[in-house]
Image (cartoon, rainbow, N blue to C red):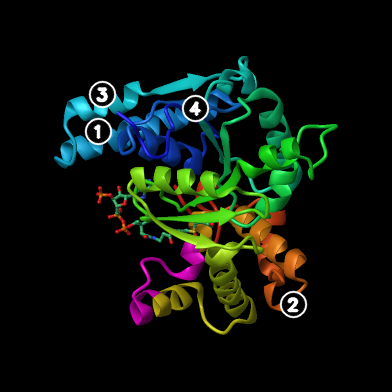
Amino acid sequence: MSIPHGIRTLGVLGAGQMGLGIAFVSSLRAKVPVLLHDRSPEQIAKGLSLMDKLLAKDVAKGRITADDAKDARGRVTVVGPEAGLQGLRDVDMVVEAVSESLPLKQSIFGSFAAELRPDAILASNTSSISITKIATAAVPKGVSPASEEGKKSAGRVVGLHFFNPVPVMKLVELISALQTTPETLDRARSFAVACGKEVTTSKDVPGFVSNALLMPFINEAIMCLEKGTATRDDIDTTLKLGMNHPMGPLQLADFIGLDTCLAIQQTLYEGTRDSKYRPSVLLERMVDAQWYGRKNGKGFYEYK
Ligand code: CAA
Protein backbone atom coordinates (compact mmCIF):
# COMPACT_ATOMS: atom_id res chain seq x y z
CA MET A 1 0.00 0.00 0.00
CA SER A 2 1.45 3.39 -0.92
CA ILE A 3 1.49 6.03 1.81
CA PRO A 4 1.68 9.73 0.89
CA HIS A 5 4.42 10.52 3.38
CA GLY A 6 6.45 7.44 2.37
CA ILE A 7 7.74 6.97 5.93
CA ARG A 8 8.18 3.26 6.50
CA THR A 9 10.38 3.66 9.57
CA LEU A 10 10.66 6.70 11.81
CA GLY A 11 13.53 7.54 14.13
CA VAL A 12 12.83 9.61 17.24
CA LEU A 13 15.79 11.14 19.03
CA GLY A 14 15.04 11.92 22.68
CA ALA A 15 12.66 9.95 24.91
CA GLY A 16 11.59 12.88 27.09
CA GLN A 17 7.98 14.06 27.26
CA MET A 18 7.98 15.37 23.65
CA GLY A 19 9.94 12.53 22.02
CA LEU A 20 7.89 9.90 23.77
CA GLY A 21 4.66 11.61 22.75
CA ILE A 22 5.84 11.74 19.13
CA ALA A 23 6.76 8.05 19.23
CA PHE A 24 3.32 7.30 20.73
CA VAL A 25 1.22 9.07 18.07
CA SER A 26 3.46 7.78 15.26
CA SER A 27 3.13 4.15 16.27
CA LEU A 28 -0.53 4.23 17.38
CA ARG A 29 -2.11 6.65 14.90
CA ALA A 30 0.22 6.67 11.84
CA LYS A 31 0.99 2.97 12.45
CA VAL A 32 4.65 3.53 11.56
CA PRO A 33 7.46 1.47 13.13
CA VAL A 34 9.51 3.71 15.41
CA LEU A 35 13.13 3.47 16.50
CA LEU A 36 13.35 5.40 19.77
CA HIS A 37 16.82 6.57 20.73
CA ASP A 38 18.08 8.29 23.86
CA ARG A 39 21.50 8.42 25.50
CA SER A 40 19.92 7.68 28.87
CA PRO A 41 18.58 4.14 29.53
CA GLU A 42 16.64 5.57 32.52
CA GLN A 43 14.87 8.06 30.26
CA ILE A 44 13.95 5.29 27.81
CA ALA A 45 12.59 3.12 30.63
CA LYS A 46 10.54 6.04 31.98
CA GLY A 47 9.23 6.83 28.49
CA LEU A 48 8.21 3.26 27.71
CA SER A 49 6.44 2.92 31.03
CA LEU A 50 4.45 6.10 30.24
CA MET A 51 3.61 4.69 26.81
CA ASP A 52 2.30 1.48 28.40
CA LYS A 53 0.13 3.57 30.74
CA LEU A 54 -1.26 5.70 27.91
CA LEU A 55 -2.08 2.62 25.80
CA ALA A 56 -3.72 0.88 28.78
CA LYS A 57 -5.86 3.98 29.42
CA ASP A 58 -6.99 4.10 25.78
CA VAL A 59 -7.96 0.41 25.99
CA ALA A 60 -9.79 0.95 29.30
CA LYS A 61 -11.73 3.87 27.73
CA GLY A 62 -12.71 1.72 24.73
CA ARG A 63 -10.90 3.95 22.21
CA ILE A 64 -8.66 1.14 20.98
CA THR A 65 -8.63 -2.63 21.37
CA ALA A 66 -6.05 -4.58 23.37
CA ASP A 67 -4.69 -5.81 20.02
CA ASP A 68 -4.30 -2.22 18.75
CA ALA A 69 -2.33 -1.42 21.92
CA LYS A 70 -0.16 -4.51 21.54
CA ASP A 71 0.53 -3.70 17.88
CA ALA A 72 1.37 -0.07 18.66
CA ARG A 73 3.76 -1.07 21.46
CA GLY A 74 5.27 -3.73 19.19
CA ARG A 75 6.07 -1.10 16.57
CA VAL A 76 8.39 0.73 19.00
CA THR A 77 11.97 -0.51 19.18
CA VAL A 78 14.55 0.95 21.50
CA VAL A 79 17.93 1.98 20.10
CA GLY A 80 20.18 2.13 23.12
CA PRO A 81 23.19 4.36 23.82
CA GLU A 82 25.66 1.70 22.63
CA ALA A 83 24.20 1.74 19.08
CA GLY A 84 24.27 5.56 18.94
CA LEU A 85 22.89 7.38 15.89
CA GLN A 86 24.23 4.52 13.72
CA GLY A 87 21.21 2.60 14.99
CA LEU A 88 18.95 5.01 13.05
CA ARG A 89 20.84 4.72 9.76
CA ASP A 90 17.98 3.15 7.76
CA VAL A 91 15.06 5.39 8.81
CA ASP A 92 13.05 7.37 6.24
CA MET A 93 12.59 10.26 8.63
CA VAL A 94 13.96 11.25 12.02
CA VAL A 95 12.41 13.68 14.50
CA GLU A 96 14.85 15.29 16.92
CA ALA A 97 13.30 16.14 20.29
CA VAL A 98 16.21 17.06 22.58
CA SER A 99 16.57 20.19 24.73
CA GLU A 100 16.47 23.69 23.28
CA SER A 101 20.14 24.34 22.56
CA LEU A 102 21.37 25.49 19.15
CA PRO A 103 24.92 24.03 19.49
CA LEU A 104 23.43 20.67 20.56
CA LYS A 105 21.01 20.61 17.63
CA GLN A 106 23.74 21.69 15.18
CA SER A 107 25.95 18.86 16.35
CA ILE A 108 23.08 16.34 16.08
CA PHE A 109 22.10 17.43 12.56
CA GLY A 110 25.76 17.27 11.52
CA SER A 111 25.80 13.66 12.74
CA PHE A 112 22.49 12.92 10.99
CA ALA A 113 24.09 14.08 7.72
CA ALA A 114 27.02 11.76 8.33
CA GLU A 115 25.15 8.69 9.62
CA LEU A 116 21.68 8.62 8.05
CA ARG A 117 20.55 7.87 4.51
CA PRO A 118 21.02 10.88 2.18
CA ASP A 119 17.29 10.92 1.33
CA ALA A 120 16.00 10.70 4.92
CA ILE A 121 13.89 13.66 6.11
CA LEU A 122 15.49 15.37 9.10
CA ALA A 123 12.88 17.05 11.31
CA SER A 124 13.36 19.11 14.45
CA ASN A 125 10.73 19.52 17.13
CA THR A 126 12.36 22.78 18.25
CA SER A 127 9.96 25.35 19.76
CA SER A 128 11.85 28.42 18.62
CA ILE A 129 15.33 27.83 17.18
CA SER A 130 15.95 28.79 13.54
CA ILE A 131 15.32 25.82 11.25
CA THR A 132 17.54 27.53 8.68
CA LYS A 133 20.50 27.43 11.12
CA ILE A 134 19.76 23.79 11.90
CA ALA A 135 19.53 22.97 8.16
CA THR A 136 22.91 24.59 7.51
CA ALA A 137 24.43 22.19 10.05
CA ALA A 138 23.13 19.27 7.94
CA VAL A 139 25.43 20.18 5.05
CA PRO A 140 28.34 17.72 5.25
CA LYS A 141 31.75 19.14 6.12
CA GLY A 142 33.70 20.20 3.02
CA VAL A 143 30.52 20.58 0.91
CA SER A 144 29.45 24.07 -0.21
CA PRO A 145 25.93 24.98 1.01
CA ALA A 146 25.38 26.54 -2.44
CA SER A 147 26.28 23.37 -4.36
CA GLU A 148 23.64 20.87 -5.54
CA GLU A 149 24.79 18.42 -2.87
CA GLY A 150 24.68 21.11 -0.18
CA LYS A 151 21.20 22.28 -1.19
CA LYS A 152 19.94 18.67 -1.31
CA SER A 153 21.29 17.91 2.14
CA ALA A 154 19.87 21.05 3.79
CA GLY A 155 16.65 20.79 1.74
CA ARG A 156 15.49 17.72 3.68
CA VAL A 157 15.46 19.59 7.01
CA VAL A 158 12.11 20.82 8.34
CA GLY A 159 10.55 22.05 11.59
CA LEU A 160 7.82 19.73 12.93
CA HIS A 161 6.66 21.33 16.15
CA PHE A 162 4.40 19.17 18.32
CA PHE A 163 2.68 20.41 21.49
CA ASN A 164 2.63 18.97 24.97
CA PRO A 165 0.96 16.62 25.83
CA VAL A 166 1.45 15.28 22.31
CA PRO A 167 -1.22 12.55 22.53
CA VAL A 168 -3.84 15.19 23.42
CA MET A 169 -2.90 18.41 21.60
CA LYS A 170 -4.33 18.55 18.08
CA LEU A 171 -1.76 20.80 16.43
CA VAL A 172 1.55 20.46 14.64
CA GLU A 173 3.27 23.63 13.46
CA LEU A 174 5.24 23.09 10.25
CA ILE A 175 8.24 25.34 9.66
CA SER A 176 10.16 25.67 6.44
CA ALA A 177 13.83 26.65 6.53
CA LEU A 178 15.04 28.81 3.65
CA GLN A 179 16.54 25.62 2.24
CA THR A 180 13.58 23.20 2.79
CA THR A 181 12.32 21.66 -0.47
CA PRO A 182 8.57 21.54 -1.29
CA GLU A 183 8.76 17.72 -1.31
CA THR A 184 10.16 17.64 2.23
CA LEU A 185 7.40 19.99 3.40
CA ASP A 186 4.65 17.93 1.74
CA ARG A 187 5.88 14.65 3.18
CA ALA A 188 6.32 16.10 6.67
CA ARG A 189 2.80 17.58 6.50
CA SER A 190 1.31 14.23 5.35
CA PHE A 191 3.09 12.49 8.17
CA ALA A 192 1.70 14.90 10.80
CA VAL A 193 -1.80 14.40 9.35
CA ALA A 194 -1.34 10.61 9.55
CA CYS A 195 -0.52 11.13 13.26
CA GLY A 196 -4.00 12.68 13.62
CA LYS A 197 -2.87 16.32 13.77
CA GLU A 198 -4.08 19.56 12.19
CA VAL A 199 -1.18 21.40 10.61
CA THR A 200 -0.46 25.12 10.49
CA THR A 201 2.58 26.60 8.78
CA SER A 202 4.87 29.34 9.97
CA LYS A 203 7.82 31.12 8.49
CA ASP A 204 11.17 30.53 10.16
CA VAL A 205 11.05 33.49 12.56
CA PRO A 206 12.13 33.28 16.23
CA GLY A 207 9.45 31.35 18.14
CA PHE A 208 7.43 30.78 14.94
CA VAL A 209 3.76 31.75 15.39
CA SER A 210 3.10 29.69 18.53
CA ASN A 211 5.84 30.90 20.82
CA ALA A 212 6.10 34.42 19.41
CA LEU A 213 2.57 34.79 20.85
CA LEU A 214 2.63 32.45 23.86
CA MET A 215 5.95 33.42 25.47
CA PRO A 216 5.28 37.19 25.85
CA PHE A 217 1.95 36.22 27.45
CA ILE A 218 3.63 33.86 29.93
CA ASN A 219 6.36 36.41 30.59
CA GLU A 220 3.81 39.16 31.33
CA ALA A 221 2.12 36.85 33.83
CA ILE A 222 5.47 36.25 35.57
CA MET A 223 6.11 40.00 35.63
CA CYS A 224 2.66 40.58 37.18
CA LEU A 225 3.67 38.19 39.95
CA GLU A 226 7.10 39.83 40.28
CA LYS A 227 5.54 43.31 40.61
CA GLY A 228 2.95 42.09 43.12
CA THR A 229 0.04 43.02 40.85
CA ALA A 230 -1.76 39.87 41.98
CA THR A 231 -1.09 36.55 43.65
CA ARG A 232 -0.10 33.44 41.71
CA ASP A 233 -3.56 31.96 42.15
CA ASP A 234 -5.38 35.15 41.17
CA ILE A 235 -3.28 35.52 38.01
CA ASP A 236 -4.02 31.94 36.95
CA THR A 237 -7.68 32.04 37.99
CA THR A 238 -8.21 35.27 36.03
CA LEU A 239 -7.09 33.61 32.82
CA LYS A 240 -8.77 30.27 33.51
CA LEU A 241 -12.19 31.60 34.47
CA GLY A 242 -12.12 34.93 32.64
CA MET A 243 -10.81 33.64 29.33
CA ASN A 244 -11.57 29.91 29.51
CA HIS A 245 -7.91 28.89 29.26
CA PRO A 246 -7.42 25.25 30.37
CA MET A 247 -4.47 26.32 32.54
CA GLY A 248 -3.40 29.68 33.91
CA PRO A 249 -0.15 31.08 32.45
CA LEU A 250 1.97 30.28 35.53
CA GLN A 251 0.63 26.75 35.66
CA LEU A 252 1.31 26.45 31.92
CA ALA A 253 4.88 27.75 32.36
CA ASP A 254 5.46 25.02 34.98
CA PHE A 255 3.93 22.48 32.60
CA ILE A 256 6.18 23.47 29.68
CA GLY A 257 9.23 23.69 31.98
CA LEU A 258 10.70 26.98 33.26
CA ASP A 259 14.10 26.15 31.74
CA THR A 260 12.42 25.59 28.38
CA CYS A 261 10.40 28.84 28.71
CA LEU A 262 13.60 30.76 29.48
CA ALA A 263 15.50 29.15 26.58
CA ILE A 264 12.67 30.07 24.17
CA GLN A 265 12.46 33.62 25.53
CA GLN A 266 16.22 34.05 25.13
CA THR A 267 15.97 32.85 21.52
CA LEU A 268 13.14 35.32 20.89
CA TYR A 269 15.00 38.20 22.55
CA GLU A 270 18.34 37.49 20.84
CA GLY A 271 16.70 36.73 17.49
CA THR A 272 14.55 39.88 17.35
CA ARG A 273 16.57 42.25 19.57
CA ASP A 274 13.16 43.52 20.68
CA SER A 275 12.88 44.42 24.39
CA LYS A 276 9.29 43.16 24.50
CA TYR A 277 10.73 39.63 24.55
CA ARG A 278 13.21 40.22 27.42
CA PRO A 279 12.78 37.40 29.97
CA SER A 280 11.67 38.50 33.43
CA VAL A 281 14.30 38.48 36.18
CA LEU A 282 12.09 36.24 38.30
CA LEU A 283 12.06 33.58 35.58
CA GLU A 284 15.85 33.78 35.28
CA ARG A 285 16.27 33.45 39.05
CA MET A 286 13.92 30.47 39.25
CA VAL A 287 15.96 28.71 36.57
CA ASP A 288 19.16 29.71 38.46
CA ALA A 289 17.63 27.95 41.48
CA GLN A 290 16.99 24.91 39.22
CA TRP A 291 13.26 25.16 39.85
CA TYR A 292 12.15 23.85 36.48
CA GLY A 293 8.43 23.32 37.13
CA ARG A 294 6.45 20.12 36.93
CA LYS A 295 9.38 18.05 35.61
CA ASN A 296 11.41 18.31 38.81
CA GLY A 297 8.73 19.06 41.38
CA LYS A 298 9.08 22.81 42.00
CA GLY A 299 8.13 25.82 39.93
CA PHE A 300 5.42 28.37 40.65
CA TYR A 301 3.64 25.40 42.22
CA GLU A 302 4.89 22.34 44.10
CA TYR A 303 4.40 18.85 42.62
CA LYS A 304 4.57 15.55 44.46
N1 CAA B 1 0.45 12.99 28.62
C1 CAA B 1 -0.56 12.38 27.98
N2 CAA B 1 -1.86 12.63 28.24
C2 CAA B 1 -2.13 13.54 29.18
C3 CAA B 1 -1.13 14.23 29.90
C4 CAA B 1 0.21 13.93 29.57
N3 CAA B 1 1.23 14.56 30.17
N4 CAA B 1 -1.73 15.08 30.77
C5 CAA B 1 -3.05 14.93 30.60
N5 CAA B 1 -3.29 14.00 29.66
C6 CAA B 1 -4.59 13.52 29.20
C7 CAA B 1 -5.35 12.85 30.30
O1 CAA B 1 -4.94 11.52 30.47
C8 CAA B 1 -6.77 12.98 29.81
O2 CAA B 1 -6.98 12.02 28.81
P1 CAA B 1 -8.39 11.27 28.69
O3 CAA B 1 -9.33 12.24 28.06
O4 CAA B 1 -8.06 10.12 27.82
O5 CAA B 1 -8.79 10.87 30.07
C9 CAA B 1 -6.77 14.34 29.11
O6 CAA B 1 -5.40 14.65 28.84
C10 CAA B 1 -7.36 15.42 29.98
O7 CAA B 1 -6.63 15.37 31.22
P2 CAA B 1 -7.27 15.70 32.62
O8 CAA B 1 -8.73 15.40 32.60
O9 CAA B 1 -6.44 15.04 33.67
O10 CAA B 1 -6.97 17.23 32.83
P3 CAA B 1 -7.41 18.48 32.02
O11 CAA B 1 -8.80 18.38 31.48
O12 CAA B 1 -7.07 19.58 32.93
O13 CAA B 1 -6.45 18.51 30.75
C11 CAA B 1 -4.47 19.25 29.71
C12 CAA B 1 -5.05 18.48 30.88
C13 CAA B 1 -4.85 18.55 28.40
C14 CAA B 1 -2.97 19.24 29.88
C15 CAA B 1 -5.09 20.70 29.71
O14 CAA B 1 -4.88 21.28 30.96
C16 CAA B 1 -4.49 21.59 28.66
O15 CAA B 1 -4.87 21.55 27.49
N6 CAA B 1 -3.53 22.47 29.08
C17 CAA B 1 -2.84 23.37 28.16
C18 CAA B 1 -1.74 22.61 27.47
C19 CAA B 1 -1.00 23.45 26.49
O16 CAA B 1 -1.24 24.63 26.28
N7 CAA B 1 -0.04 22.82 25.85
C20 CAA B 1 0.84 23.50 24.92
C21 CAA B 1 2.06 23.98 25.64
S1 CAA B 1 3.18 24.79 24.58
C22 CAA B 1 4.04 23.53 23.87
O17 CAA B 1 3.92 22.38 24.14
C23 CAA B 1 5.00 23.85 22.83
C24 CAA B 1 6.02 24.82 23.08
O18 CAA B 1 6.62 25.18 22.10
C25 CAA B 1 6.41 25.34 24.39
Displayed-image quarter of ligand 1: bottom left
Magenta-highlighted residues: 240-252
Please tell me whether mark 4 or mark 1 is closer to you in this view: 4
How many angstroms separate mark 2 from mark 1 (CA)?
47 Å
Left or right side of 247 for 270: right
- Kindly identify the residue that appears in the image at 82 percent across and 32 percent down: 141
| Label whose residue precedes the other's in the sequence (2 or 3) | 3
> What secondary structure is found at the residue carrying circle 4?
strand
**Mark number, residue 56:** 1
| Label whose residue precedes the other's in the sequence (4 or 2) | 4
**Hey, what amino acid is under mark 2?**
Ser
Please tell me whether mark 2 or mark 1 is closer to you in this view: 2
What is the residue that sits farthest to the top in this orientation? 82
Rendered location of residue 276, percent (x, y): 69, 78
**Mark number, residue 70:** 3
For the residue pair 89 and 167, the one nearer the viewer reads as 89
**Hey, what amino acid is under mark 4?**
Leu
Q: Main secondary structure of the magenta part?
A: helix
Mark 4 sits on what residue?
36
Q: Is residue 199 above or below residue 86?
A: below
> What secondary structure is found at the residue carrying circle 2?
helix
- Kindly identify the residue that appears in the image at 34 percent across and 43 percent down: 194
Mark 2 sits on what residue?
275
Q: Is residue 280 magenta?
A: no
What is the residue that sits farthest to the bottom in this orientation? 229
**Image marks 2 and 1: residues in contact by CB distance under 8 Å:** no
Left or right side of 176 for 132: right
Quarter occupied by residue 217: bottom right
**Hey, what amino acid is under mark 3?**
Lys
Rendered location of residue 125, percent (x, y): 55, 47
